[in-house]
Amino acid sequence: MASTVSFSPAKVQVLQATSCHGHAALGSSFAVPRTGPRPRSVAVRVSSEQEVRAPSGRSIEECEADAVAGKFPDPAPFVRPKAPEGTPQIRPLDMPKRPRRNRRSPALRAAFQETTISPANFVLPLFIHEGEEDTPIGAMPGCFRLGWQHGLLDEVYKARDVGVNSVVLFPKVPDALKTPTGDEAYNDNGLVPRTIRLLKDKFPGIIVYTDVALDPYSSDGHDGIVREDGVILNDETVYQLCKQAVSQARAGADVVSPSDMMDGRVGAIRSALDAEGFNDVSIMSYTAKYASSFYGPFREALDSNPRFGDKKTYQMNPANYREALLETAADEAEGADILLVKPGLPYLDIIRLLRDNSALPIAAYQVSGEYSMIKAGGALNMIDEEKVMMESLMCLRRAGADIILTYFARQAATVLCGMR
């Protein structure tokens, strides 16, 4: 039985290709106005009883009749691939379970892959400064201090083009604005609030994370206020951090991220945000931030090295494991929305520890030292930079990280999109 379907060629629907970050552009579907004669309709004949024949010209019925009669073509002879000469002749092991069976082909390996990674898992750290020119960072090849009005926008545009829609901002503050109490941190017209407003205006859908700490604004280079005897004041610092977080939220930040490691700062910041009506602003706490030697290139980027001493009285001892559970319990109780581990790759055990002991999202920071080592190894042809980059990010995901702060975000997303 056949039917006839009529359509007008004046009605056209266009579907454009889907980009890497998942936004399909739907073209117009409408009647195109025409002048002159009315377009003629086109009749298409569709039959549900069309006879289908094999390439040989035989019908399905004829092929089925051969099958019923047992007229099958002879199978190709089975030939077992030969082992190299000298391979011992043995009796196969009596092994009911052979895990290699599920790894024997690319299709099977892809089907059973337990961990996946996508651009949505990346947060791109961006260094910003007051200048108009982008300044390269010597210890971090491929990274720049970006001019907040121009270079930053170009970098964010390129990141979003490959599906990276989250950024975290780190400011290079002029020395003249640095003070012992870091008051510039909560200037509503400071570098970070201005940048947040600009990003939200140009890219309304972007997720902006901010850093909450005093070290970029402190003349002492520490995350908190330093007493004359060198002690980092905890509660007085938390007071300043609350004002900083509220200022960032007022500018439009989506997630404020206290990286200072002061006791009680998550609860205080949550209360301060709620009191100002910013109930929907999230807190990503640097829950397990270690006093690591992997931060060197970052401190060069922001010129934020401590003027004296180190940060061991507030950042965690790299030798400690169980202590991370204390920090996790405190941050959860105080209202953190995301828990972060820093550094990343050297602390996979800590990422897994938090993953197994908390239902909150876990973030990992692949820090500047990790980035620079991979870059240096690739430049010296000691490793395959791209493969090591992707493996390192997959390892962070496998350990339990939901999101990864990484300077490789745009480069890795480009690889995931099949672009170069």
Image (cartoon, rainbow, N blue to C red):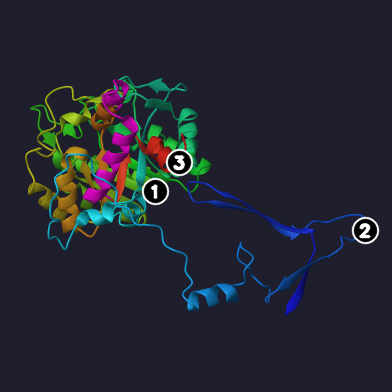
Query: Can residue 242 be seen by looking at this rendering?
Result: no
Residue for point 14% across, 22% down: 308
Magenta span: helix, strand or loop, mainly? helix
Mark 2: which secondary structure?
loop
The reply to whether the C-beta atoms of the residues labelled 3 and 1 are less than 8 Å apart is no
Task: Residue type at mark 1: give it.
Answer: Ala
**Location of the N terminus (image quadrant):** bottom right
Q: Nearer the viewer, residue 159 or 213?
A: 159
Residue for point 90% across, 54% down: 35
User: Which span of residues is magenta-colored?
Assistant: 375-401
Task: Residue type at mark 3: give it.
Answer: Gly
Residue 37, which numbered label? 2
Q: Nearer the viewer, residue 357 or 204?
A: 357
Mark 3 residue crowding within 10 angstroms, few (<14) / some (14–19) / many (20+): few
Of pointers 3 and 2, the one earlier in the residue sequence: 2
Residue for point 44% across, 63% down: 74
x%, y% of residue 109?
A: 31, 52
Q: Quadrant of residue 28?
A: bottom right
Left or right side of 268 for 108: right
Query: Can residue 419 be seen by looking at this rendering?
Result: yes
Task: Name the outermost residue toward the right.
Answer: 36
Residue for point 35% across, 42% down: 123
Q: Nearer the viewer, residue 95 or 266?
A: 95
Q: Is residue 290 above or below residue 296?
A: below
Circle 3 or circle 2, nearest the eye: 3
Mark 3: which secondary structure?
loop
Circle 3 or circle 1, nearest the eye: 3
x%, y% of residue 14?
A: 67, 54
Residue 418, which numbered label? 3
Distance between the Cα atoms at labels 3 and 1? 15 Å
The residue identified by callout 1 is 120
